[in-house]
Amino acid sequence: MSIRVLVVDDHPLYREGLTTALSTMSDVEVVGEAGDGAAAVASAATLHPDVVMMDLHMPVMNGVDATRAVTEAQPEVAVLVLTMLEGDDSVFAAVRAGARGYLLKGADRAEIHRALTAVAHGEVVFSATIAPRVLSYFATGRSRSVEPFPELTEREREVLDLVARGLTNLEIARRLFLSDKTVRNHVSNVFAKIHVAGRAEAVARARDAGLGTA
């Protein structure tokens, strides 16, 4: 029986290429595509795939939130993350959201096929560079204590969390009893440290890491 796969990625050319590659696998059937997290959740509900191949950094709804929504609504569906993001914050956020696998976009066709087969049969799989970190993360019992974005100060992480919740700089200033200028400085420092160009990208990165959702 073929593995029914839903392909989710916001880049049409990459999505098309991945779909073409999967279509050459005799035991894989691509049942649909989606270009953002919200569309992925809706498509999974109607198409009932065995596996959702999920990018993380997407518009409308990011891949972590989409993974959580899919796995909560359809526990039988396996989510296999396929992304460029390899930082601990992204990996652990995806795992906490329910992803059964995490591959980087440099994976070749054979590795993707092995991962699809594994997660479809209830196994978990991670890229070779990521697996040791995941094992260490859980083996040391740190899954609840590790803070995302360790390069940020506690105050900067607090500001980023509020940015991810949709607050403006002025609203953050009022919430934290800071001046607007101080908040602007914190926001600029955060953007520089996590290497994002603007607020929308910062929100996506923060939500991928589990911030802004409480």
Image (spheres, rainbow, N blue to C red):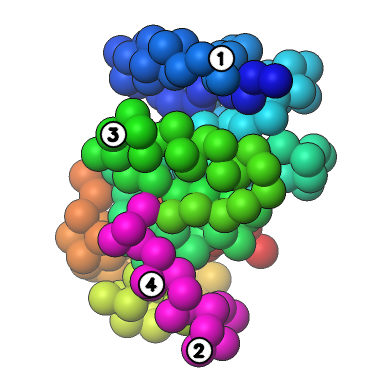
Which SS class for mark 2?
loop
Amino acid identity at mark 2: Thr
Q: Which residue is mark 4?
A: 133
Determine contact: label 2, label 4, CB under 8 Å.
no
In the image, residue 69 sits, relative to residue 123, either above or below, namely: above
Mark 2: few/some/many CA within 10 Å (<14, 14-19, 20+): few
Number of the front mark, 3 or 2 = 3
Horizontal and vertical percent for residue 148? Answer: 42, 71
Residue 158's disc is none
Which residue: 33% across, 77% down?
Answer: 150
Disc nearer the start of the sequence (2/1): 1
Q: Is residue 175 visible?
A: yes
Q: Which residue is mark 1?
A: 30
Give the spatial CA distance, label 3 vs label 1: 18 Å
Disc nearer the start of the sequence (3/2): 3
Which residue: 53% across, 41% down?
Answer: 80
Q: Which residue is mark 2?
A: 140
Viewer-proximal residue, 60 or 27?
27
Give the spatial CA distance, label 2 vs label 1: 38 Å
Which SS class for mark 3?
loop
Give the spatial CA distance, label 4 vs label 3: 21 Å
Q: Is residue 200 left or right of residue 192?
A: right
Viewer-proximal residue, 41 or 25?
25
The magenta segment is 127-145
Number of the front mark, 3 or 1 = 3
